[in-house]
Structure formats: structure tokens, C-alpha cells
Image (cartoon, rainbow, N blue to C red):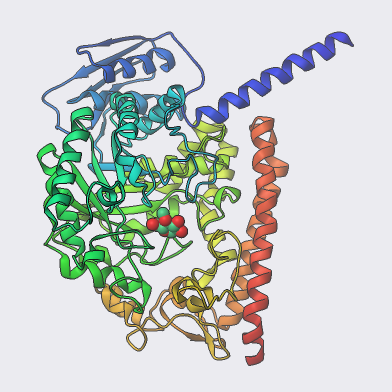
Amino acid sequence: MKKILFTLLTLTVFTLSSWAEDGHRLWLPAQKSQTAHVSTNAQSATIDLAKQELTDYFAGTKATLLIDPALTDDEGFTINGNEDSVVVRARRDIGLLYGAYDVLRRQAIQGNMNHVEQHPRFRLRMLNHWDNLDGSIERGYAGESIFEWFHLDEALLHQYARANASIGINGSVLNNVNASPKMLTREYLDEVRKIADLLRPYGIRVYLSINFATPMVLGDTRTADPKNKRVRQWWKRKAKEIYSIIPDFGGFLVKANSEGQPGPGDYHRTHAEGANMLADALAPFNGTVIWRCFVYGANHKGEDRVKQAVSEFKPLDGKFRENVILQTKNGPLDFQPREPYSPVFDQISETPNMAELQITQEYTGQSHHLVYLGPMWNEFFQYVEPEWLAGISGVANIGKDRNWCGHHFSQANWYAFGRLAWDPSLSSEDIAKEWLGQTFSTDENFVYMMSTIMEESRETCVDYMMPLGLHHIFKFDHHYGPEPDGFKAEYPLEWCPVYYHQADANGIGFDRSSKGTDAVSQYREPYASMYDKLETCPENLLLWFHHVPWTYQMKDGSTLWESLQYHYNQGVINVETYHNIWHNKMRHYVDEQRWREVDDRLEDQVQNAREWRDVCLKYFGGFANKKQ
Ligand code: GCW
């Protein structure tokens, strides 16, 4: 009896420590192998990391890392060999590190290790943290910030750097775009330097979000007008100071004249004038200004919100300095479960563009819903060509939670973001399979079942939240549950759900056709015409572009109201199925702790999906049923 008890106890201890390790390690290798002999033809801190990773985790006998000046001058690499012996070649040391991680990924999922050649598709592959200096995170659902100012946890930051390097991320904006002016004070910059020093060997450059009014708020100037000489000098001096301590500093990310943030508009200057002032300050050091196009309610107040970015920035196209990049969210509104692509990508052609994706699930169930965003990002790249983009940013979902992202499956979104920033032609399904294999188990059955669920999960979320092109019917402020009747006279109309769905006795949806706000005209052909006509508008965007009668006949013969009910119900049925599968079939593939945590969250998701369906159908039914 004693013996059994003892065995049980040690088993428990073993399982506990292994889940704790697992949550923490993300998709990175767990089993140390230490049989490999690793040799190199060059030396640097980055190559040391590559060497260490292969020494620790490559299960073969021999690995060779070679700097090869004949190869393409980017961060790419080649791999040749097999699971016993590999040669990684790259022009730069960071290529060797990326190559080493690729070897380990291939090892984990039994992938091919011969004649591999990889190059990143985008030069800039960045995370945007919305982390505040007090440790809180705007739209963060995984605990506090990992950037603990004045008490930096270096071990944690190494893990962070390692995880990012393993998927090719090469830039990190450390603080929220709603930026504190204090970020640029010397005491914080000295901390930023420590982070930059730590991330450098992993190939990650540090950037900062800046508050446009910084010199004025800090009391150094009387204005923040970009045409003011003292203000311009202040920024030049600040840039010099930053580069004296962080020579490879990436640059500034700026949210200006948007949602209450200061900007050049406060002085009747354009976004170009504001961006160019900063660009001039950074140019001598090869720094970049990343200027966000997420603006509404300022110069074009009253116009359909989804049109305002183009209205604002198109006239300025071509007026920005060479080291300015415009960063635009994937859709024209705000990271909804489904949006059409942003027409900024059609209209801005003289200025480099960057796409901003949201990894943190602000509008897709936060860290409570299993919603894999890979398919959403694949969809985006069906409309926006990678050649049009200088880079990709993802709003990070990382916090101090033991599992990093709140929900174990939210780690997949961080992973998928990195993989797609490296190669946007990868399929979300392949990425899901890779991630599952490295994170949980390579068992075929498990990977098949769970990748199927992951692949469906975004459409399912659209179904139970906002099918057929509905958007922004979230509860005020926290954006978690439904509030279709949301209206507050004291708020701008564009924050109110009733403004977006426009349900009334005649029908539902926002008329953005040429007969309505004409947002369709901002799109290139064939999309402008396709979205404009009710008959050719894809049904999954119908209510985004049209106000449609409840009795309108859908392609499958049902009425619009019937179709809406069908989608809401289907969304709930799908989540119930996911929960059943996880609960009844997945337990033996996954350690107890992670199984239980995911199970609990799926249970919440079922409840939440039912709430979305019930609240929305009751509210919309109030109009629709009168018509039946
Ligand atoms: O998605 C919305 C969020 C805000 C965010 C803003 C932005 C950082 O609700 O919290 O602010 O967009 O992207 O600037």
C-alpha cells in the first residue's frame, strides 16, 4: 500500500513538473538530447546561441553551422542533410540561428532536412506590445507585462527572445501605442538599453511607441508643433541620445490624432508633417518612423468610420520621407472577427505600407475562447499582396501568465503570426499541425482532430458572434460579450453597436454601397463593383456593405433572417462539439494540467457562445419576427 502511495506521489510530482515546464516552453523543444557534436566556421553571440540550441536539442550526431558569403544577403539559410547529420549555411549569423530553429522544428514534426532553402518574405516582422509602464497591458489577457521596468526579469526575457527568434520575429515595440511621454526619459531609456542588449543576439531590434507631445509634456518645450524649431531640435537631440546607448535602435511607432492621442493635427499640421519631423530626427541613424493609419473622428469626423483612413492618408501619399512606413490594420474598422481588407492597401502606393494584425484576441473571445487566427490572416493575404508590404506587425498576446498567452491555444496565434510574417504563403492548417506537434503531441489522430477544430474555430466564432458581415456589436469598453442594443448618447456614434448593425423593421446591415456611404468606391476592381451589388457581394460580408430586408432570399433559398438564425445556432453547435471532443477524446494525449485548463475554457466558451446567440437572436428577432 505504502509503495503504491509512494509511486502515485512521485508520478504526480513528475506530471506536475512536466506540465509546468510545458506551459512555459511554448512550442520549443523540451527533451535535451546532448548527443550532437556542433561545429562552426565563425563566432558571434548569435552563433553561440545557434550552437547551444543544436548541442542541447538536436538528436542526431553531427551539425555544422557555416557562414557562407556566397549566399543571398538576407536573414535566410539553407539546410542539407538528414536527421543524423545536418549542415546549415547562411550569409549572416542570424540566418544560422533561424536555420538551427528550423532544424529543430523539422526534427519535432519529422520534416525533411535536405535541400531546404528559406528566406523571409518581409524585412520587418514585428511584435507591437500594448504594455503600459505600470505593468498593465491594454487589451492584454495573460497577466501583467513581461517588461518589468527597473526589475527586469532577464531569464524570462531570454525565453521571450528565444521563442520569437524561433519563428523569425526581428522587431519588438516594447510599449503601448497610447504612449506615456515618460518612455523617453533617461531612466527608462537605460532600461530599454538593457532589453535591447538582451534581445540583440536573437536578431530582435527594439522600437518604442512615442507620444507626439512628449517634449511639451515633459516641460522641455511650450508646444509640440512639428514646425517649431525647438521641438524639432528636441527630437533630434533625443534621437542622438537614444542611438548613443542603443546603436541599432529600430525607431518610433506613432499613434497620432487618434482616440484622444496628441498629434500634428493639434497644430493644423498634416500627418506627413508630423511624421517627417520624426523621420528627419531618426534618419542620420537609419531609424524608421512607423506611423499608424488607425485614425477616425478627427479631420473626417462624421464620415463613415471605415472610410476615414483613406480620406486622411490618400492625399498625403508621396509626401512622406523615405524612412516613414504607414501601418494599417488588416480591416478598415478594428480587428473584428471578420472584416473586408482595408482599402488603404489599394490606395496608398507611394509610401511603404505595413499591415497590423492583432494577435491578442480583443474581439475574438480574448483568452477564453479557442479561436485560431491563422485562417483569418490567410484570408487577408488573398486580397493584399505581400509585395505591397514592407513588413508585418502583430499586437502581442503575451503576458506574465505561466502559459504566456492566457489560453494554451492562444500560443498558436503568436506562433502562426511569426510563421506567416516569415512566409505568408504558408497554409494556416500546416502551421496548426506544426504547432500542435511541437506543443502537445505528434500523434496523428490528435493532430488531425485538433487541427480540424483550430481551422474551423475562427469561422465558428464569426458564426456565434457576428455572422454575414455584422460587426462591432460588442459590449462597450471591454469588447467581450454582446450588446446589440448598445447606445449611449454621450458617446460618439461610432462606438455604438446600433450604428453598425442598423437593424430596423425593414432589415439589417450598414449600407456602404454607392447608394449609401459609398465605402465600396475605395476598393480596387473587381472588389468595388462586387461589393457594391447586393447580388455579387459575398454573403459573409453582406451586412457590412448592405442594408438587407429580413425576407431577402439568400443563395441557399432561405430568408436572411433564417440564415442569421442558422449561423448563430451553428456557431454554438460547433463549440459544443469542440468541447465534447476535447473532454471525451483528448485527455490521454495531453498532460492533466493543460487538458483541464483547456477544458475549463471550452466550457466557458460554450456558455459565452450560447449567450451571444440568445442575446442577438432575441434582439434582432424583435424586428425580424414582425416581418415574417
Ligand atoms: O482596437 C482598439 C482598442 C484600443 C486600441 C486601439 C488602437 C491601443 O480597443 O484599446 O488602443 O484600437 O489600435 O489604437
Answer with left or right where residue 87 lies relative to residue 589.
left
- Residue at 21% in and 17% down: 66
Residue 120 coordinates in the image, percent (x, y): 25, 39
Please identify the quarter of the rendering in which residue 203 is found: top left
* Residue 258 seen in the current view: yes
Quadrant placement of the N terminus: top right
Residue 185 lies, in percent from the top left, at 30, 38
Q: Is residue 422 visible?
A: no
Quarter-wise, where is residue 620 in the image?
Answer: bottom right
Residue located at (14% from left, 32% from top) = 73
Name above or below for residue 542 compared with residue 345.
Answer: below
Q: Quadrant of the C terminus?
A: bottom right
Q: Quadrant of residue 534?
A: bottom left
114 lies above or below 228:
above
Residue 494, percent from left and from top: 44, 73
- 454 to 489, vertically: above or below: above
